[in-house]
Image (cartoon, rainbow, N blue to C red):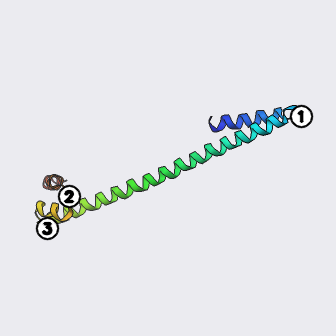
Amino acid sequence: MNEQEVLDAIKEWENLSANRENKVLYEARLKFLRDQLANIRGEREEGLKEGIQKGIEEGRQKGIEEGVQIAIKKMLSKGTAPETIADMLDYPLEEIKKIQREIERGH
């Protein structure tokens, strides 16, 4: 059930509750529906929190990667050998050589 279906069901059960015979059934069903609604809203909130955390982690990782690439470019511009950079940063030599080729092409 989605949130709107639960809200619609609550409204319907409220209308049925006017009949005294249905009151006990109404209250049990209403409790169930409210629990469902709380679960849906809780899951949505949990999903939102997870999404935000994932975005933060991805942003942090992207920032770190950009920082490493800036450092590599600086070291290459100062004449540091790609092999030395790879060893110092524990970074793939082929990636450093790729950055070096980009610098040489003027990018």
Q: Write the residue at 74% across / 42% down.
A: 31
Mark 3 or 1, which is nearer the eye? Answer: 1
Query: Of label 1 and label 2, which has the lower sequence position?
Result: 1
Q: Quadrant of the N terminus?
A: top right
Position of 52 with respect to 69 (left or right) is right
The answer to which of 9 and 60 lies nearer the viewer is 9
Q: Which mark is residue 20?
A: 1
Q: Residues within 10 Å of mark 3 (few under 14, many from 20)?
A: few
Residue linked to disc 2: 91
- Does residue 19 lie above or below 85 as drawn? above
Position of 96 with respect to 41 (left or right) is left
Q: How far apart are labels 2 and 3 at the CA level?
A: 18 Å
Q: Amino acid at mark 1?
A: Arg
- In the rendered image, residue 3, in percent from the top left (x then y), is placed at 64, 39
Q: Residues within 10 Å of mark 2 (few under 14, many from 20)?
A: some
Q: Amino acid at mark 2?
A: Tyr
- The quadrant holding residue 69 is bottom left
